Image (cartoon, rainbow, N blue to C red):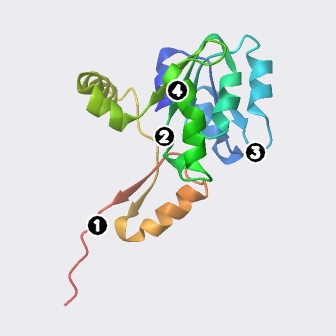
Amino acid sequence: MLLELGRLAGLVMFGTVSPAKHSVVSAYGAVPIDYRTEDFVRVLEDQAPGGIDAVFDPIGGPNWERSIRTLGAGGRFIGYGYTSALGQGNSEEWVKEWSSPAAKRVTENGQSIQLYSITSWKKERPDWFMEDAGQVLDLLREGRIRPLIYRRIPLREAAEAHRLLEGSQAAGKVVLVHVHDEVEE
């Protein structure tokens, strides 16, 4: 979704992905960076010497420090989707470490820090949430954005969906579908 919105806005974009997903990132007009073999901080220093205007970091944990290093002077860091980071290692320590910059909403160098949680946004600012959701649904309805669906899997095969997600094999969403089973007589 971020890449589609960025493409619509005409942004220069970079995405850290495994080689199997490079073509997907390139198709949205972004430059793929192989996070397994390349140091994205160094690649971005070469590609954008003045720093990046905005970093969207869904990884969390120690990765946020590296992402912040890529920001330009007026850059913004947006963290989202950190539930996976909270499930790894000592999540209490990570939350404690992250709480100070997140509460200040600014990095040591003065760049903006924002944490985005769709659940919190919906509760705390339902008017903003509805406006944003409405705009995204309009783009979808107009065909200007299209969700990338990797695979549709019957709900009874949910373990396969988990295997795909855990193995980082899915480029796009894995959708579980309910299939009405025929009643055996």
Q: Between marks 2 and 3, how big is the CA–CA gap?
A: 21 Å
> Residue 184 vs residue 132: left or right?
left
Nearest the eye: 100 or 136: 100
Q: Between marks 4 and 1, how big is the CA–CA gap?
A: 43 Å
- Mark positioned earlier in the residue sequence (3 or 1): 3
> Which residue is under mark 2?
81
- Mark positioned earlier in the residue sequence (4 or 2): 2
Q: Between marks 4 and 2, how big is the CA–CA gap?
A: 15 Å
- Mark positioned earlier in the residue sequence (4 or 1): 4
From the viewer's perspective, is residue 132 above or below residue 50? below
> Residue 95 vs residue 1: left or right?
right
Q: Between marks 3 and 1, how big is the CA–CA gap?
A: 37 Å
Give the quarter of the image for residue 60. top right
| Amino acid beneath label 1 | Val
Q: Residue at x 50, y 62 (%)?
A: 162
Q: Can residue 80 be seen in this view?
A: yes
Q: Which residue is drawn at 51% across and 20% down?
A: 105
From the viewer's perspective, is residue 160 above or below residue 101? below
| Amino acid beneath label 4 | Ala
> Which residue is under mark 3?
36
The numbered disc on residue 179 is: 1
> Which residue is under mark 4?
102
Assess whether mark 1 and mark 3 are in contact (beta carbons under 8 angstroms).
Answer: no
Q: Residue at x 61, y 58 (%)?
A: 167
Which numbered mark, 4 or 3, is in the foreground of this view? 4
Q: Is mark 2 on a helix, strand or loop?
A: loop
Q: What element carries label 3?
A: loop
